Amino acid sequence: MEEKLRRWKQQKQESTRGKKDTRPGSGATAAPSGVKRKLAAGPTRASESKSVELKSKIPPAQKHPRVSGRPLTTKAAAIMKPRLAAEDSCNKPPTSAPVVQREIRGCSSMDKENRAVNPPNQQVQEPFTIVEKVLGKELELHKLEVAEKILQVSKELETPQNDHLQEREPLGVVEKISTDKKKEFQLVGEEKLVDKEPKILNNLIRGGPSPTVELRPELLAKDLVGVAIGFEKKRRLSTAFSIFKRAYHLLPNASVKLAERLARLQREYPAVVDHVPSQKFVTAIYMQKVLERDLMSVLNDGSKNDLMNVHSIGDKRAELVLGKRPFHQLEDLQQVPGITVNVLAKLYEHHTNWENHR
């Protein structure tokens, strides 16, 4: 720019001198093209004084710092990308953003001048070095402050402020679900049985007795006597004695015939007294306990015909049951092939409902 301005001023001065010299009596000669040229004698004193005055009036040109001729706009954009990304991620306060924008606007205006004046081979100091370092330190400090705040909040959450929170019991530990199929099954005899089946069976058979309609004591006692006579005919005397005992307990007036029957059974089979449940239970629960014992007695001591009369046990299963005796609990009946959890649950539910034995 300085060079252009200086050349423009010189051309203007020469043009003004040429006009003055072309006037008559100035001592200039006309060129072939019609323009009078100055003689070789040199400038006059008047022209020299005027040129000095003009030069004194013009202020000296300011020297601009030499900047690299490389395009700075691309470099500024490359610097701005990591800064803006860091500001977005760390929620940097907006005070530093205008500083970066002013630097970029200044550099873009200088870039236009440098392209016209400076040669491209010159390397100068980049104006972004100091700003980049300062912003990097600010970002690091801001990240440290955020990390300290997070640690402080986490410590406050871990240490409760109230005393009653510290007295709270610890949370229960969740058991891991086993994916090992070898532990899930166990061999019993010739069949594979699921280890969880006894628990499922307990939930099925321990859910309570079947709902029954409580009749008047006289009618209920009469029905129970009929069931007890049926068990007595099958020579299951312990079960018959317990049911007779319940019917005698329900009657409002003592029955002489029923008392004589109880005395005779007790005299002939003294062990039947040991298996009578408490009379404090309601009739449904009382009969359930009596028939549970009767079912185990049939499974361990009954004949093949007795086993075939049990619900869900036919000829083939009766033969298999005879080969798997003795059974210490009802769940052991699963050792018999073909008797699953559902079959055993139905068998139990049917046999312990006293109304099915009428």
Image (cartoon, rainbow, N blue to C red):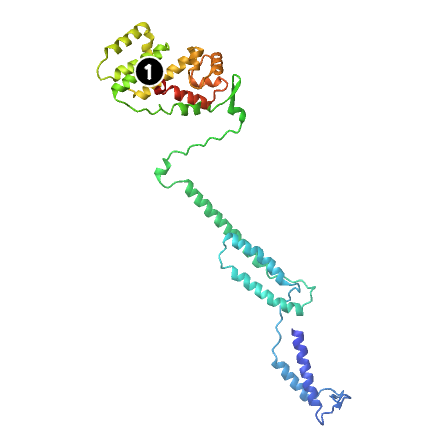
Q: Residue furthest right?
A: 32
Q: Position of residue 187 (x, y in %)?
A: 52, 19
Q: Position of residue 354 (x, y in %)?
A: 35, 19
The C terminus, quarter of image? top left
Q: Is residue 242 left or right of residue 144?
A: left
Residue at 30% x, 20% y: name it. Answer: 283
Q: Position of residue 76 (x, y in %)?
A: 60, 60
Circle 1 — which element? helix
Question: Is 26 rendered above or below residue 91?
Answer: below
Residue 214: which quarter of the image? top left
Q: Is residue 276 visible?
A: no
Q: Is residue 84 left or right of residue 358?
A: right
Q: Amino acid at mark 1?
A: Val
Residue 223: which quarter of the image? top left
Q: Is residue 51 left or right of residue 36?
A: left
Q: Nearer the viewer, residue 325 or 98?
A: 325
Q: Nearer the viewer, residue 38 or 82?
A: 82
Q: Residue furthest left?
A: 253
Q: Which residue is mark 1?
A: 227
Residue at 65% x, 76% y: name it. Answer: 5
The N terminus, quarter of image? bottom right
Q: Position of residue 44 (x, y in %)?
A: 70, 88
Q: Nearer the viewer, residue 165 or 227?
A: 227
Say how many tags the image has.
1
Question: Is 348 rendered above or below residue 154?
Answer: above
What is the crowding at mark 1: few (fewer than 14 residues within 10 Å), some, or many (at least 20)?
Answer: many
Residue at 43% x, 45% y: name it. Answer: 153
Question: Is 273 rendered above or below residue 211?
Answer: above
Q: Residue furthest bottom?
A: 25
Q: Is residue 283 left or right of residue 179?
A: left
Q: Is residue 287 visible?
A: yes
